[in-house]
Amino acid sequence: MKVSKPSFKRLLIVSYRLPFTIKQTKEGLELVQNSGGLVSAVLSMAERMGNNPDGQATKIHWVGHADPKLKSIDQSVFENETFVAHPVFMDEAVHKGFYEGFSNDLIWPLFHYFPSYASFSEPNFDDYQQASNRFLEELDQLIEPGDLVWIHDFQLMLLPRQVREARPDATIGYFFHIPFPTYEIVKLLPRTWRQALIEGLLGADVIGFHTADYVQHFIQSVSEVLNLPIIGNRIVLPDRPVVVKDFPISVDFNKFNSSGQEPAVIDTRHFYHSELRQNKVIFSVDRLDYTKGITSRLLGYERFLNQNPDWHDKVTFVMTVVPSRDKIEQYQEIKREIEETVGRINGLFGSIGWRPIVYSYASMTFTELMALYTLCDVALITPIRDGMNLVCKEFVASRQDNRGVLILSELAGAAQELKDALIINPTDTQEVADAIKQGLHMAPEEQERRMQRMRHHLQNYNVFRWSHDFLMAFDEVPGSQPGLETD
Ligand code: GDG
């Protein structure tokens, strides 16, 4: 990939979360940088932007929500060598309605095709608007001519339009990290809300989604709600076009590829290997969420054990569920369901010396995660719906040895790219059971063939390519400044 230099002066990222968490230590407050996909992509952009006229590295400005308890601390805490964070503080009641309410209790379930979990509340929509106003206030003090404003995700759908109204000449990008559903789902939103959300997004110059299907769904909603002319991948507004395109997010391939060789990862891998009595290992890790298909996965494994007694005592399913949103009733309910199912399967099939499922409800360190990615024989990734799913890409990128089998749900965005996985439908218990059997029996040559093709794809379409392609799309917008200088 040719490395081009960004042509905008500064990059202003806006997302619900800041790129670091603030921790209280004995020495005072400390910034711990997050390591998610977005942070890696943005770090690579910081490198490409090079130095400013004073000879110092150009810093990335990042606007995100922060706990109001941090309001009184010295604002210099919010800066490290790469990022200058601009915390958005808001009233706790507004935050609750905006984040827990409208974002997590309505948009999240609805856009993942779980309408029965969606809670429609007018006060929450008011809070969503108010929270967006707070983000705008922070941003408005910051924007200078020549900046690129890049807004992220479903918590901030109203913001692009607000920025456009405040700064008509701004260059604005928006990326949507979860699925954009068909209009039949969007139509469940009250008319005024869906119109506000679609118009909100159209404030951007470039709108990115993970897959071509999500792009089509968005275009369908734009034409149903606003009846605007659409030419190819451009929505034609009276005063300017909006480019809508798919940019599948990815991982830092080299980081995952090489981390398996770090001494701490090797030690942890050896430790797990002996603890698991050198059994074949199936692995999964997800945040606790009803979209991730955790119970369906367990039922598939149970069916496999039922039908294949010769595998008893020879395979262990290491299943980690990372705590998330577990104050919410639906999440408590799925946690209960998961734990009952794990208990039932272990009780039915286990023995004194063998636990069929090693389950933990905890988060792992990066070292532990890498040890399991590189140790397991099968990665079992079965979301009922997932915008992309980075876990499967991280697993593939980690397998420098070209071994291991990926079982992947056709309902994850990643299934559009990783066609050499064993693709299953998570609600088809027999298909999951058969794929587990096929995976455990797969000859090393076939594992290698499939892995090599998937790894080759991710080596090219890594997270740096993702941000590069997104920025290149600004070249298609007349009047907006180009995202990258090409030579
Ligand atoms: C949203 C969309 C889309 C998880 N547990 C641990 C841990 N993780 C890391 C993984 C991975 C990330 O968290 C999870 O990413 P996903 O993509 O799977 O899922 P969401 O958080 O739901 O993200 C999703 C994504 O946005 C990006 O656009 O792919 O579809 O829902 O990086 O490694 N990391 C560590 N310990 C854990 O226990 N260290």
Image (cartoon, rainbow, N blue to C red):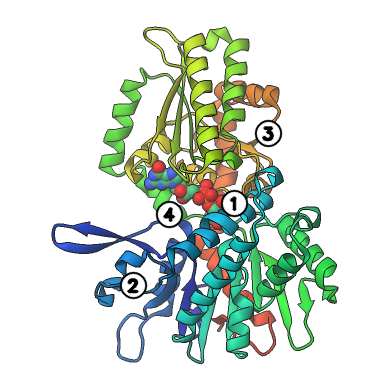
- Label 3 is placed on what type of residue? Ile
State which tag comes first along the sequence, 2 or 4: 2
Against 171, is 318 above or below? Answer: above
Q: Residue at x 30, y 90 (%)?
A: 54
Query: What's the distance in space between the residues labelled 1 and 3, CA to CA?
Result: 28 Å
Can you give x and y, in whole percent of width and height, for residue 337 in the image? 54, 27
Element type where label 3 sits in the image: strand
Can you give x and y, in whole percent of width and height, for residue 59 in the image? 36, 78
Q: Which-is-in-front pick, marks 4 and 1?
A: 1
Element type where label 4 sits in the image: helix
- Label 1 is placed on what type of residue? Asp
- Label 2 is placed on what type of residue? Thr
Question: Is disc 3's CB within 8 Å of ligand 1?
Answer: no
Q: Residue at x 26, y 41 (%)?
A: 264
Q: Mark 1 highlights which residue?
A: 105
Element type where label 2 sits in the image: loop
Against 371, is 442 above or below? Answer: above
Q: Mark 2 highlights which residue?
A: 82
**Label 1 crowding class (10 Å Cα cut-off): few <14, some 14-19, many 20+?**
many
Q: Do the residues under discs 3 and 2 have CB atoms within 8 angstroms?
A: no
Of residue 78 and residue 53, the one placed in the foreground of this image is 78
**Label 3 crowding class (10 Å Cα cut-off): few <14, some 14-19, many 20+?**
many
Can you give x and y, in whole percent of width and height, for residue 352 in the image? 37, 7
Element type where label 1 sits in the image: helix
State which tag comes first along the sequence, 1 or 2: 2
Disc number for residue 424: 3
